[in-house]
Image (cartoon, grey):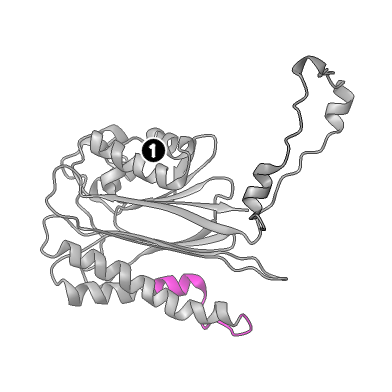
Amino acid sequence: MKKDIFTRLHLKKAKPAIPHSDINTIPLPESQIEGLSVNVRRIEPQQLIYGCAQSIGKQRDHNEDCVFALSIAIGGEKTSSPLGLYVVADGMGGHQYGEVASSAAARTLSGYVLKRFLPYLVDPSSSMDNSIQDLMRSAINDAQRAVTQAAPGSGTTLTAALVLGQQMTIGHVGDSRAYAIHPDGGGETLTRDHSLVKRLEELGQISPEEAAVHPQRNVLYRALGQGEVLEPDIFTATFPLSGYLLLCSDGLWSVLTDSIIFKLVTTSKDLQSASQSLVDAANEAGGPDNISVIVVQMKT
């Protein structure tokens, strides 16, 4: 009767272990240590991975935030360019249908970008009609129309990052934010808040400390669905290759300092743990608003 492989492996006679007393260790000289080469395993194809988390917060009765996150890996003999699209939209509190506005903005922008970009990825020989910045601008304008139709009188922020290879194009309206975070725990804000208080701070009329506690710090002068003319901030930057890209609503950054945010991202075991830790910390700090977080890293 034949025995299965697991049974046969268990029936094999184990070799006696070498007694520890018979093992001698000899330290390597410095010259040999310096000559050793460390093999670093490279990941092919390059991949964009992300973690995402949300919370209603502790002082709101419904969620007016919306997020969208998508990563695509493309590998071949001549190309290895990951694609990622990440969006955070925060419906304006106090307005009717804030959650409708944020959903319409995030879904419309994402659909617009993917509908026009994916054919190019499937057939690289085809050419795109517009630059990526023009594509982002058109997508935001389309989102503006969608918000106006779906939730008249309401509004939403919108911060989106389209990553292709090592370049990312960011489109931004409102006071959700995009951060670049470095492995050493440092980082910088990539976007500029379109708030009245931030504008006063930029003009030197109030200090950053005064801005942080100003009673009108959540009042925006630019948002989707508010006004017919929209001027989004659109720019291209290098993806933080050894670090992280963070997109979040003001429910996170308004209650946690940048240093705490950066530390939680860089010390977490993985991106999903980092995202959840950020949300948990914001709730522990009072959770006055909805909280949305997307943390992105490129594996190379």
Residue 123 figure quarter: bottom right
Q: How many marks?
A: 1
In the image, farthest residue toward the top = 21
Identify the residue at image location x=77%, y=39%: 38
> Image height check: is 126 above or below 243?
below
Local secondary structure at mark 1: helix
Name the residue located 73 percent from the left edge and 37 percent from the top edge: 13
Q: Is residue 205 left or right of residue 264?
A: left
Please report the residue visible at 56 percent of the width from the left and 65 percent of the height from the top.
73
Q: In the figure, residue 67 lies in which quadrant?
A: bottom left
Q: Left or right: 123 with respect to 175?
A: right
Position of residue 249 measured from the top left corner of the image (x, y, whole percent): 30, 51
Q: In the image, residue 40 lies at what x, y percent?
A: 72, 45
- Queried whether the magenta region covers residue 134, the answer comes back as yes
Q: What is the crowding at mark 1: few (fewer than 14 residues within 10 Å), some, or many (at least 20)?
A: many
Which residues lie in the magenta part? 124-138
Camera-nearest residue between 103 and 152: 103
Task: State the residue at coordinates (11%, 56%).
Answer: 94
The one of 10 and 218 positioned closer to us in this rendering: 10
Q: Which residue is mark 1?
A: 261
Image position of 181 (left or right of 166):
left
Task: Say which quarter of the image contains residue 201.
Answer: top left
The image shows residue 191 at horizontal and vertical percentages of: 40, 52
* Amino acid tagged 1: Ile
Residue 258 visible in the current orientation: yes
Any part of residue 226 in sight? no
Nearest the viewer among 222 and 68 is 68
* Quadrant occupied by the N terminus: bottom right
The picture places residue 100, in percent across and down from the top left corner, at: 19, 67
